[in-house]
Amino acid sequence: PAGRIIAANDRYVAAAGRSRQELLMMPIDQIGELLEPRRQGRHGASTLTCEVRLVHHSGRPHWHRRTVVPIFDAERNVEKYICIEIDITDRRRSEQLALAHARKHEQAAAFARCALVESDFDTLCRLLVRAAAVGLQADCAAPVEQSDGGTACVAVGPALLAGPGPGG
């Protein structure tokens, strides 16, 4: 359901990252980024549930499960909706950490499988550099020969690839 917010408690104002006056002028669908499709509730087509990503004043994202429940008048017409949001940030962050951990383990296992069958040192080095880039969540990585004759792996993330920022 679309509609303008007519009241918001203090915790919702803080979570939404906007002033109360801003919220009271906005449709609920404009607050937060919808992360998954809405699911119809068991109690009729009007009850909807979804997950949204909100950005706090600090710029740090947090996640809520949003349920929009209809309130009916005596004739069973929808009079208004109540939006109930539950903070699921800890769960979402745990899921993200678990996925990142699994990716690192998979990359290490893939490198180990290649190392068992690959005899060419240069090919192994390229595979190791690729594994390092994935493990570090870098956009690219490369082996760099050092002055003492050794080799180091250098990984570069998106912020460094974009060039210097303001003042740099």
Image (cartoon, rainbow, N blue to C red):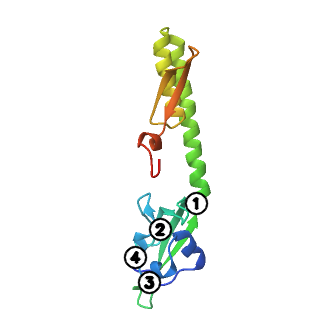
Q: CA distance from mark 2 to mark 1?
A: 22 Å
Is any part of residue 118 visible from this angle? no
- Mark 1 belongs to which amino acid? Ile
Near mark 3 (Cα within 10 A), the count class, few <14, some 14-19 or many ≥20, is some
Residue placed under numbered mark 1 in the picture:
88
Residue 153 image position (x, y, % from top left): 53, 25
Disc 3 or 1, which lies upstream in sequence? 3
| Residue depth check, mark 2 versus mark 1: number of the one nearer the observer | 1
Q: Mark 2, residues whose alpha carbon is within 10 Å: few (<14), some, or many (≥20)? A: few
Residue highlighted by disc 3: 80
Where does label 2 land, which residue? Answer: 42
Q: Residue at the spot x=56%, y=63% of the render?
A: 58
Label 4 belongs to which residue? 27
Mark closer to the observer (3, 4) = 4
Q: Residue 107, position in %: x, y? A: 52, 29
Label 4 secondary element: loop
Circle 1 sits in a helix, a strand or a loop, which is it?
loop
Crowd tier of the residue under label 4, counting other residues whose Cα lies within 10 Å: few below 14, some 14–19, many 20 or above? some
Q: Is residue 8 above or below residue 156?
A: below
Between 167 and 45, the one nearer to me in the picture: 167
Q: Amino acid at mark 2?
A: Arg
At x 41% / y 74%, what residue is drawn? 46
Quote the CA–CA distance across marks 3 and 1.
25 Å
Extreme residue toward the left, this view: 2
